[in-house]
Image (tube, rainbow, N blue to C red):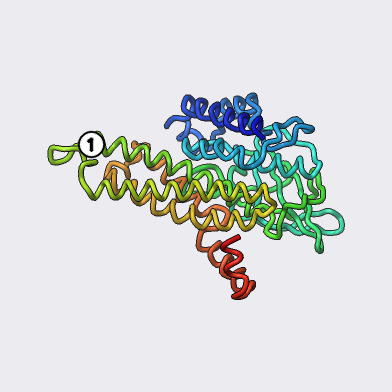
Amino acid sequence: MSTELNIGELFAEQMDRLLSDRVNRELLISVENGRAADTLWHTLEELGILLALVDEENGGSGLDWEDVEPTLRCCGRHGAPVPLPETLLANWVLAASGLALPTGPVTVSTALYQLNANDKLQGHDSAVAWAPLCENMVAIAERGDNRYVCLLTQKQFQVEPQETLAREPSGAVNLVGVTPLAIAGAPKPICELGLLPYLASLRSVQIGGALEELLSLCVEYANTREQFGRTIGKFQAIQHAIAELASQTAAAQVAGQYAFRQIDADNAEHGGMIAKIRAGQAAGRGAEIAHQVFGAIGFTDEHSLHYLTRRLWQWRCDAGSEFWWSERLGQKAIAAGGDGLWPSIAG
């Protein structure tokens, strides 16, 4: 276990150095205009990070989800304009299903598709992140009581570009009578909601990383911006706001860590549900605080703040908002009955 942790920490350190060097305003604008960050992506491939969750027999590092949490949190902190989280999830699912891994970036659809007796897919997903720029997509389909992992190439699915708050490439995907490039029975951890809880967990970790960077920016700004003869960080109202931002950041990061531990424990839906609720709340309040601290300058297009807050708002919506997950959590609590409430909390 100690060796795995060291590899996970190494990946996180490499990721931080790489993104600190490569991710800047020009690259973010370029990706938001529909151009892929190919140079950055090729470097990630060379580092082997894309196969971190894949077992060693299939050429990966065999890390647990908990081990890659710092790396994905780093992606959120820098607003990395690449589908790294989606590709990590896709490669993990494909390898666990015994399917060959494709090259290049892979996105995931959280919709549950229908698979007929002739292995034809039918279904629709209104928003698939990075679909316009990914050569492949992984989806989960059901036929009767069985679940299947399906790999498709972009030539097999129609993508209708969609505008998002993050301005990153996204599109609606419609499948009508499509035969997957590859298909296999879904591994045991895939729960009734398909890939939705896993993407919810990923977004929760990214939110925690983005909030960490927001906190750093706010502290730096409060200690340098002067008003009425002193730095604004000397004002009690600003101190209270930044303290609350710190607490929201910590809560989101702990929630993301919890979600990844639950995936390792084959309890992905519960972990993703709890994490997305708490991280979503933190994203909304954290972005609000940051813009209050920066004032009008934070809303200008030239400032760096909105590249993080727009992603926070988008990730808050992705894979089910905190309101959607809260309703599902309530339904599960009601179904378990009064006697089941306390054990579900204490457990």
Relative placement, left or right, of 85 versus 91 is: left
The residue drawn where x is 16% and y is 38% is: 230
Secondary structure of the residue carrying tag 1 is loop
Residue 124: image location, x then y, percent:
67, 57
Q: Is residue 171 visible?
A: no
| 27 and 51: which is toward the camera | 51
| 104 and 44: which is toward the camera | 44
| 58 and 105: which is toward the camera | 58
Image quadrant assignment for residue 341: bottom right
Relative placement, left or right, of 74 versus 218 is: right
Image quadrant assignment for residue 327: bottom right
Mark 1 crowdedness (10 Å alpha carbons): few <14, some 14-19, many ≥20:
few
Relative placement, left or right, of 25 versus 55 is: left
Residue 325: image location, x then y, percent:
56, 61
- Looking at the image, how many numbered discs can be counted on the residues? 1
Residue 212: image location, x then y, percent:
43, 41
- Among all residues in the image, which is located at the extreme left? 229
The residue drawn where x is 61% and y is 42% is: 66
User: In which quadrant will I find the N terminus?
Assistant: top right
Name the residue that disc number 1 marks: 225
- Among all residues in the image, which is located at the extreme bottom? 338
